[in-house]
Image: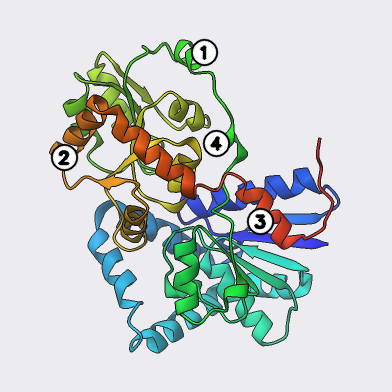
Amino acid sequence: MKIFILYTSAGSGHFKAAQALYDYFKNNNPHLEIRLIDILENSLRPFRNAYTSSYAFMVSYVQVFWAIGYYVTHFIILRPVVMGIRFIINRINTFKFSGFLAKENPDIIICTHFLPVEVATHLKRRRKINSRLFTVVTDFGIHPFWLSKFTDIYIVASNFTRQQLVRRGIKESRVKVTGIPIEQKFSRQFPRGALLRKFNLEDRFTVLIVTGSFGIGPIDRIVDLLRRDVQVLVVSARNKALFDRLRRKNYPGVSVFGFVDNIEELMAISDLIITKPGGLTISEVLAMELVPIFISAIPGQEAANIEILKGYGIGLCAKDNKEVKELVLDYKEHPEKLNKIKENMRRIKKPDALREIYNVVCPGGPRNTG
């Protein structure tokens, strides 16, 4: 069986979901012919650069333009025009990948971003491929770009997400609530004492601050406000300027990390996480039962994620830095509030998302139980 897992490199979440799926499928069925593909690598260079760079620029510096684009594309009256322009631009710039996909005609296509969904949909409509198309929605809300009548199965984060799709005319039988795929390491058990020694940290109330690969948000100011009251761990990721600033300050009780591949260990020794409400991040903190405080939400999908989580009694969004400190200290002084939220997290977290997705895509297929 030939399986293509398709994503785009605009933001890290789509890739992380695709990578987690690829690793799980390979480990559990070595007989699969499976490929992990960033479709932007096969697109025209100006389009690829614009797609990745414009996303990073807008979410970091001019979120108002991102918000306008997000909400305009929701208006039904404008949708035919928007979709038409988008289709033409995407077709021109992904024609090379379309030809490749038509030639390969895999048995199964799994998409963790809406751009490859559109490419696969066009080919299925024209009968250039007969692949089964699985769309993995990587947020808790649904944007119209995800919708396609040629998607065979939608794989979603929650019952709320399923209900949104059903209200938009998708048959309930085509929607599977498995959770968003994340790496299996977030479901492990961790020895807190050993990790504290590994990172040379004290055994006290600890707050982790991480805002994605761009390291955006008022992190410096939040560190200044919290450093005297709690132990602070900061992951600056690719934001080298932030890393250098905090390292120069050399605050006692503040540990600064750059880009890390063991974020699960830092999460395991933390009592709270201050972060952005991306779909993958939310799924990771749910798996770790690490209570979040959200900041710097991107208008649109991340704001929607916050509203959906509120319905489950999970996650507070701080309106400013002062409120961040107030929330942290309130949680520190009232551990019962943390425990209540963790109970709510247990009700909706999906620790077996990868296994469930595998069973949806390959029902009855061989599994490596070793």
Label 3 to label 4, Cα distance in Å? 17 Å
Answer left or right for 61 relative to 78: left
Nearer to me, 10 or 292:
292
Label 1 to label 3, Cα distance in Å? 33 Å
Residue 46 visible in rendering: no
Label 2 to label 3, Cα distance in Å? 39 Å
The circle on residue 357 is 3
| Residue 17, image x, y percentages | 57, 51
Identify the element where label 1 is drawn. helix
The circle on residue 194 is 1
Q: Residues within 10 Å of mark 1 (few under 14, many from 20)?
A: few
> Given contact means CB atoms under 8 Å apart, are the residues at marks 4 and 1 in contact?
no
Q: Amino acid at mark 4?
A: Phe
Which residue bears the numbered disc 4?
Answer: 186
Seen as rendered, the residue at the extreme left is 322
Label 4 to label 1, Cα distance in Å? 17 Å
Q: Residues within 10 Å of mark 2 (few under 14, many from 20)?
A: few
The circle on residue 100 is none
Which residue bears the numbered disc 2?
Answer: 323
Nearer to me, 158 or 149:
158
What coloring was used for the rendering? Answer: rainbow
Answer left or right for 55 relative to 130: left
